[in-house]
Structure formats: structure tokens, C-alpha cells
Image (cartoon, grey):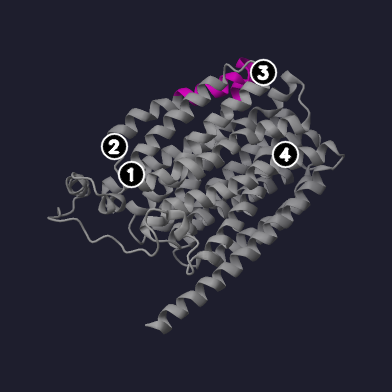
Amino acid sequence: MSPYQWVVIGLCILINMLDGFDVLVMAFTAAAVSSQWSLTAVQLGYLLSAGLVGMALGSLFIAPWADRLGRRPIILLCVAIAGIGMLLSSFAPNPVLLGCLRLLTGLGIGGILASSYVIAGEYANKRWRGLAISLQSTAYALGATLGGFAAAKIIPDLGWPSVFFYGGVITLLLLPLLMLLLPESLDYLAHSDADNALERINTILRRLGREVLTAKPEPEKTTGDNRNMLAQLFGTALRSTTLLIWLTFFLVMFGFYFVMSWTPKLLTSAGLSASQGITGGVLLNLGGIVGTTLIGLLSSRVALPRLLVVYLLANALALTLFVSSTSSLSLAYSLALLIGILVNGSIAGVYALTPSLYSTRQRVTALGWAIGVGRAGAILSPIAAGYLLDHAWQAAGLYRLFALVFVFAALAIAILAGVRSRYRQAELASG
């Protein structure tokens, strides 16, 4: 690993830190926004989901263009979109316009995530690839944690719009740094038909301290129609893998965004103060820093699917105990930290696993669509929780319901591991 490889991974970490802040800032401002505009739980659920709708659309319809136009230009464009959306959100005069601007912000974030994960994985060597990818989720949790601390500090004095304002400014300030230092994906350039592709490859190789090439490397062969990457994901060899990874993303994000979006508000409803509720949300993200790093380190020793099953089942158990623990603040905070470790680690593990299931040419499209399908779960969960709360569900019942979601996700991963094992055995048998 050359210093420049770590620089590239570091840039991807910065991108994901800002994404974590941008996505979950609505959860930290939810109580203040709801109070100002007298929102019902369902209305607040729609507002929490607006950014997730944008992320789904960005993952489905913007991220795949990175396989055609390059990872770098898509990342730069989407960082600009996310920053502008955040900045304008601070001036929203009503919840409808705020929801529209959250959707715009989500478009940018959804377009970024798949490319940043893929670039981090491609610039890491084999030994450190699992850690490099999982660190992106760590950064996501770190950005959300810092956002929670910032929200708790400045909302009482400056109001909730200030959180969006400073987030937008910081996001836009990252653009010049990315334009200067972020390279294009070498795998993308190796497949590119551009006249200067070899020259760009050699420029990057020099920065990596590697020997330059006299000709482009032979592109990795893929099956199916190269003009339709999505169709390749449903070829005979990949159909079961794609459906199972989509189901896993849907279930994990359905559970993840309920936990991350509603916990600060539900802790407040369970009798804690607004500040204590935000602290609970911060601890979820603080735990995420540990959980995502830990799963990256463990993945070099233990098969990732097996780790994911353990994380998911342990998280289901922790969720069933969570809200009933609020009578003891220290116990509630400890469980929030544990859930943060497990739920963020689960997300990191699914992100890290997916690119390894596909060829170079398919990775961004595969991960982008998996994230997009997962966002459908992310969109539905805050709204579903708001609907159930408006129909007299208690917080403890909600957490037990969403614990079952993680049990089903663990089952999907176990089935996926079996499918991949049988596929590899068939490949070896065929020669």
C-alpha cells in the first residue's frame, strides 16, 4: 500500500463522513422541526424519508452512469448536488419545501455512495480491501456522530436551520480537494475506449510509485450484453445472488433506518429529555465507528457471510431489550452503543460483501442497484413506524417488530452463502 493509495481511501472516508452527516441530520433535528411546525408522527416520517427517496433514485439512476462516464465525475457532480441541497434546506420556509430539498440532497448522496465504496476497494490491496471498504461505513457513522454532537450544541442557540447551513458549507468546501486529489478508477480506465485512457492510467501509476504501461491491460471478460449492465446481474450465474443480495439490502436498510431515524425521538417519548434523546442517537453512531471497523478487521480472519449472520442475530436480540431499559439511563446508553456497533457493522458488511460477488465491469451497477433497492426499505421504515405510532403502538413493540427484520436478513445471508458455495463447486467441477 503506497501513501497515495491511503490518500485515495482517506478521500473516500471524507466523502462518506459528510454523507453520514447529511443523511442523519434530519433525525437529529426531527424534534425541533416537529415542534416548530406541529407535525404528526406520519408527517415527520415522510420528512425523514424524503432524503432516503432521493438516495434511492440517486443509487438507481445516477450511480450506474459511473460505469459509463467514470467514477470521478459522478462523485464530483453528486457532492455538489448534496452540498447545494443541504445549504438550501436551511432556508426552507415550510415542511413541504424542506422535504423537496431533502430529496435533492438524497439524489447527490445516492449517486456518490456506490462509486466511493468501489474506488476505495479498487485502490486497496487484497490484504486491506475489507478494511478499506468497511472504513467507509465507519466514516459514515463518524460523520453522523459529529453531526449529532453539533446538532445538540447549536440547535438550542441557533435553531435547527443552522445545522443544515453548516453541513452544506462544509460539503461544498470538500469539492476543490476532491478535484485536486481524487483519481479515476484504474479498472474503469482499463475498460475505457477514450484516446487518453493509457496516459491517465500511467499518470496514476506514477503517483502510486508503479511502473508505467506500454499498452492497456486486457479488460476482464464478462458475460452478457455490455450495453446493459443490469441485464447481466440477472444472467443464469448471478440471478439468485442478485435477488438474495437485494433482499438483504432491503431488510437491513429497513431496520437500520428505523433505528437511526426514530431512536432520538422515541427515547424522548419514553421519558428522556430532548438532549438525552440526541445523545442516544449519537451513541448509535459512535458504536457504528467501532462496529464497522471491527467487522473490517475480522473479515480478514473470518468469512464475511458468517460474520454478518452473527452481527444480525445479535442486533435482533439487543433491539428486543432496548426501549424497556430507559428506566436506567446508563443501561439504555450502553444498549444504544451496542446496537450502534451491530447495526452499523451489518450495513458495512453488506456493502463490503456485494462488490466481491460481481466482476469489475458490473460492480458499481450491482452495488448501486442493491443500494437503490435497499433504499426502498429505508424509505418505508420511517413512514411505517410513524403510522404504527399514530395507531397507538408503543416504542418497545416497534423495536421488537424490527428485530424480526434482522432475523430474516440473517437467513437471507445464510442462503446466499450456500448458493455461492454451490456455484463455486459447480465451476470447479466444470473445469
Q: Earlier in the sequence, mark 4 or mark 1?
A: 1
Q: Earlier in the sequence, mark 4 or mark 2?
A: 2
Rendered view: 153 above or below 66? above
Residues shaded magenta: 152-169
Q: Residue at x 65, y 54 (%)?
A: 251
Mark 3, secondary structure of its residue:
loop
Residue 259 in picture, x, y percent from top left: 68, 44
- Give me the C-alpha separation between circle 3 and circle 4: 19 Å
Q: Residues within 10 Å of mark 2 (few under 14, many from 20)?
A: few
Would residue 138 appear left or right of 51 to someone viewing this image?
Answer: left
Residue 213 in picture, x, y percent from top left: 15, 55
Q: Which mark is residue 383?
A: 4
Main SS, magenta region, reads helix
- Give me the C-alpha separation between circle 4 and circle 2: 40 Å
Amino acid type shown at disc 1: Val
Would residue 131 appear left or right of 24 to someone viewing this image?
Answer: left
The answer to whether the residue labelled 4 contacts the one labelled 1, judged by CB atoms less than 8 Å apart, is: no
Q: Residues within 10 Å of mark 1 (few under 14, many from 20)?
A: many
Mark 1, secondary structure of its residue:
helix
Identify the image quadrant of residue 184.
Answer: top left
Residue ID for mark 2: 181
- Please tell me whether mark 4 or mark 1 is closer to you in this view: 4
Amino acid type shown at disc 3: Asn
Residue ID for mark 1: 8
The answer to whether the residue labelled 2 contacts the one labelled 1, judged by CB atoms less than 8 Å apart, is: yes
Q: Earlier in the sequence, mark 2 or mark 1?
A: 1
Q: Earlier in the sequence, mark 1 or mark 3?
A: 1
- Give me the C-alpha separation between circle 2 and circle 3: 39 Å
Q: Residue at x 53, y 30 (%)?
A: 105
Identify the image quadrant of residue 80.
Answer: top left
Q: Residues within 10 Å of mark 4 (few under 14, many from 20)?
A: many
Amino acid type shown at disc 4: Ile
